[in-house]
Amino acid sequence: MPAFEVLRYSVPIQDSFHLPLFPGAVPLSVANSRLQPGSHIDVWVRTPRARHERPAEYIVLRIAGTGHPVDDAAATEFLGTVITPQGLVFHVFYRRASTTDDLTIR
């Protein structure tokens, strides 16, 4: 049995988004959404195959257009850049979190 699998999550393009993850999961890459291009991005995550628990941690995605300010604390890791069909460019950063605070959960 494989040790991991790669899962895809569709996330709305907004300033911040909490994405629940299984323990040991690692964000891999981002791209424009195949199903909702221009309004969502797809995030691929390497996820342990043996998942006996519910998601226990989160990554907080920070999605910023070119030239928009980004707080260092909100962007500890760079995940990638997405170009929408309309030509808009978004840079995606993330940080790990253990709570959801006041942001959208999917």
Image: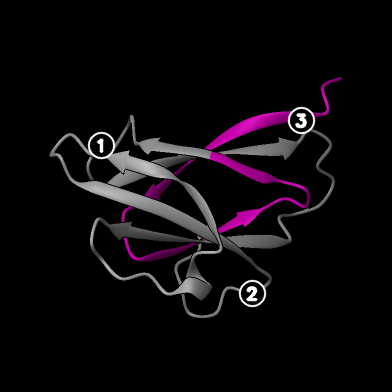
* Secondary structure type for disc 3: strand
Span colored in magenta: 1-28
Residue identifier under label 1 = 37
Q: Residue at x 17, y 34 (%)?
A: 85
Q: How many residues crowd around disc 3 within 10 Å: few (fewer than 14), some, or many (20 or more)?
A: some
Q: Are marks 2 and 3 in contact (CB under 8 Å)?
A: no
Q: Check the image and name the residue furthest to the bottom.
A: 101
Mark pair 2, 1: CA separation = 29 Å
- First in sequence: mark 3 or mark 1? 3
Q: Check the image and name the residue furthest to the left.
A: 86
- First in sequence: mark 2 or mark 1? 1
Residue 42 drawn in magenta: no
Q: Amino acid at mark 2?
A: Thr
Q: Can you give x and y, in whole percent of width and height, for residue 102 in the image?
A: 48, 79
Q: How many residues crowd around disc 2 within 10 Å: few (fewer than 14), some, or many (20 or more)?
A: some
Q: Residue at x 52, y 74 (%)?
A: 73
Image quadrant where residue 47 sits: top right
Q: Can you give x and y, in whole percent of width and height, for residue 25 in the image?
A: 71, 46
Mark pair 3, 1: CA separation = 28 Å
Q: Is residue 101 above or below residue 82?
A: below
Q: Residue at x 32, y 61 (%)?
A: 14
Residue identifier under label 2 = 99
Residue 90's disc number: none
Residue 4's disc number: 3
* In this picture, residue 90 sits left or right of residue 97: left
Q: Can you give x and y, in whole percent of width and height, for residue 4 in the image?
A: 76, 30
Image quadrant where residue 42 sits: top left
* Secondary structure type for disc 2: loop
Image quadrant where residue 35 sits: top left
Majority secondary structure in the magenta region: strand
- First in sequence: mark 2 or mark 3? 3
